[in-house]
Image (cartoon, grey):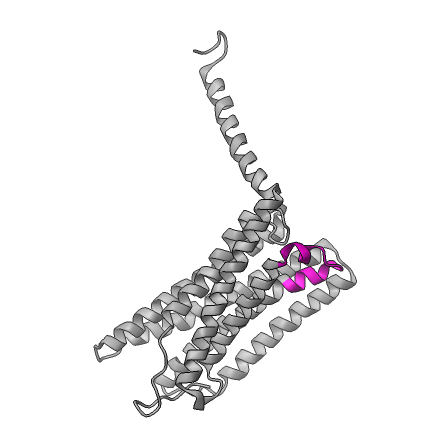
Amino acid sequence: MVARGVPEEAVMAVVASLDFTETSNWWRDINDSPLWQDRTFHLLAVLYGIVAAIALVQLVRIQLRVPEYGWTTQKVFHFLNFFVNGVRSLVFVFRRDVQKLQPEIVQHVLLDTPSLAFFTTYALLVLFWAEIYYQARAVSTDGLRPSFYTINAVVYVIQIALWLILWWKPISILLILSKMFFAGVSLFAALGFLLYGGRLFMMLQRFPVESKGRRKKLQEVGYVTTICFSCFLIRCVMMCFNALDKEANLDVLDHPILNLIYYLLVEILPSSLVLFILRKLPPKRGITQYHPIR
């Protein structure tokens, strides 16, 4: 029953605003709760620890299968996955202590270094695909590895320079610039997967021999390209919001749910899926020719 003189639309608007307030309070209560913060960060630590353990086990299995080939691209890829996820796990175990570190730039270094290593890890996969693509087309690949090292060196030098400037003069515009720079790096990685993953996928589609191995490789490249392109694109968008909107800040303790969603989408799920898709071991020596791309 509506009170006399009060329009029904106004009453419904008040009810709707009350529902929104309850939702906002629920979200705020979780964000402000030290218990929920610790639970969320410890959950992230466990998930990262599981992914790191999977990468390490796979690295050991590959080494036992083909120990004579040294550090192939496949081995380095799994080692970097182990490193990135292992460091992330440790950071989230001690997340509350990390937030207390001074100067503040130390916090940014500990939180951002695994992101840089994540970029290097998956840029290595792009390099691997680029080498396969150009070798199949009888094109020289001599310039690919120097380009890979140069791009990574430039990214690390710029990021370290931004950290040093922030340490010397911690102003907000530099922090925004640092986050936008990494958004640009993530977009560059996404385009790399789209370019070379797409090229390799199209080449495999045109391959004249129909076989089970070809179909599996086609699916592998298609799935990994989609996953990695999506995760780096999401990271790019999220880093832009992180830089420009305080409510989307990922470097604070009181945004645990946002941290959970972000790291699940851009690192944990993509790493888990890619490790599962690329789980096949190289053939033993003597069974077939195995020529690692170094």
Q: Residue at x 38, y 85 (%)?
A: 135
Percent coordinates x, y for residue 132 in the rendering = 39, 81
Relative side of 57 to 214, left or right: right
Relative side of 141 to 287, left or right: right
Percent coordinates x, y for residue 19 in the rendering = 49, 29
- The quadrant of the rendering that contains the N terminus is top left
Note whether residue 129 is visible. yes
Q: Is the residue 239 above or below the residue 57 in the image?
A: above
Q: Outermost residue toward the bottom?
A: 286
Query: Is 107 part of what is drawn in magenta?
Result: yes
Count of marks, rendered view: 0
Percent coordinates x, y for residue 11 in the rendering = 48, 18
Q: Outermost residue toward the left?
A: 210
Q: Nearer the viewer, residue 120 or 92?
A: 92
Main secondary structure found in the magenta portion: helix
Q: Residue at x 49, y 23 (%)?
A: 15
Q: Which residue is drawn at 69% across and 65% down?
A: 162
Q: Nearer the viewer, residue 30 or 191?
A: 30
Q: Outermost residue toward the right?
A: 168
Q: Residue at x 36, y 79 (%)?
A: 281
Query: Is 26 part of what is drawn in magenta?
Result: no
Q: In which quarter of the image is residue 239?
A: bottom right
Q: Outermost residue toward the top?
A: 4
Note whether residue 236 is visible. no
Q: Nearer the viewer, residue 122 or 201?
A: 122
Q: Quadrant of residue 105?
A: bottom right
Q: What stretch is highlighted in magenta?
A: 94-110
Q: Is the residue 234 above or below the residue 290 in the image?
A: above
Percent coordinates x, y for residue 177 in the rendering = 65, 59
